[in-house]
Image: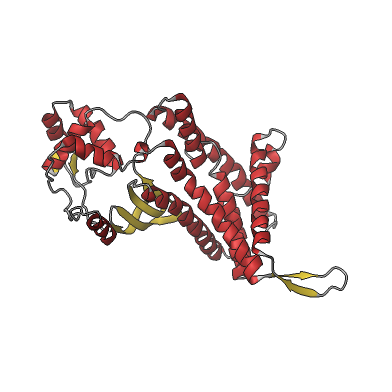
Amino acid sequence: MNVVMMIICATIVLGVLVFIHEGGHYLAARAFGVRVTEFMLGMPGPRISFKRGETRFGVTCVPLGGYAKVCGMEGGEIKPHIEQVLASIYRRGTATMEEVAADCGITDDEAYEALEELVEWGSVEPPTKADKFNTYRTPEVKPTKRQIRKALKRHLPAPQSTELGSPRVVENAHELYESEYSQQYRSKPFWKRSIILLAGITVNLLFAIAVFIFIYSVIGFDIQMPDSGEIVHRTLAPLQSIQMGFYYIAAVFQAILGLFNPATAAQTVSESTSIIGIAVLSQQWFAAGVIPALEFTAMISVSLGLMNLLPIPPLDGGRFVVEIFQKITSKVVSTRAMSYMSVAGMILFVGFFIVMLNQDIQRILTGFWS
């Protein structure tokens, strides 16, 4: 097998699908006025990037996976004194944790907790490796042309560019806090938070259906007539292609449900594949041509979307279950509880990954994919 081609094909498939998935989260968040500070293809690490508005776009050195950093998704209660801390750092522009604590009359630990939450909000920039002390700064702001036009259309002052760490005029600390809080995921009503969470899954499924329509209704396909053996080129009506897409989605969904049935869980896992299997299959489908490669990408898009629907943190489905729980009980799930659930979920997925990785290695050694 050509290992390089396997890696290239898998990177293309996963890169496209992660871009689509995270793009869904990004677009939904921005549509509801939620700040997104990063949109990256690849795992966190060294990157090549550029900043547009408040969002930094780029590619990391490990081009598998990706993420959109939607602000305000942390669990638990808002840290105390956050309003005073925000006003302090904005008035100073650049300040150490101790200086902020002295301004607000709170302990260093309280200042640190509030500052770190503001970093997660995208309202404050964190300390750098070059800082000798815990130094925080106001963020750089470069309004886009769209933001300027929007402000002028509403007869508001056009937003001005500000440099990193520059002091700001704070006339009303509460208004400043409300302005920053309104751009957080946690400030939005349940239905908007739900749309943001499920947008990535929805876009994955819509992409797959669009591909099915393109292949079966626009490109068409060849079939062999059973009586004469003649090869006939056919196309389907768009509605038929959509139905095929939903049939496939339902089949994958039913297979995933098999994980929760003790009688079928082992068989479902045995029929699944890891990233290595996806790489091998990607090369085979790409070798068959552009259309088969596109069809394969659509099929993986369905699997990626539906797997993210599993009610296990930190997947989108797990976060959605937490949102439903909070809505029904009117209780806020603590940061610690979310961390424990996320760790448990990761342990579960690592277990699945090890099992499927072993299966894929055995398939390669036995020539199953040759």
User: On the picture, is 46 further left or further right than 80?
Assistant: right
Residue 92 in the image: state x and y as whole percent.
11, 41
Display coloring: secondary structure
Q: Quadrant of the C terminus?
A: bottom right
Q: In front: 158, or 231?
A: 158
Name above or below for residue 230 compared with residue 127.
below
* x then y, percent, for residue 230: 82, 75
Q: Tell whether 29 sits left or right of 370.
A: left
Q: Is residue 54 left or right of residue 265?
A: left
Q: Residue furthest right?
A: 227
Q: Give residue 99's position: percent from left, percent from top.
A: 12, 34
Q: Residue at x 47, y 37 (%)?
A: 319
The residue that appears at 19% across and 42% down in the rendered structure is: 136
Q: Compare residues 255 and 127 and report the one nearer the observer.
A: 255
The answer to whether 81 is drawn above or below residue 16 in the figure is above
Q: Can residue 168 be seen in the rendering of this structure? A: yes
Residue 339: x and y in percent read 42, 32
Q: Is residue 288 visible?
A: no
The residue at 64%/71% (across/down) is 219
Residue at the (55%, 55%) spot, across then down: 206
Position of the N terminus by quadrant = bottom right
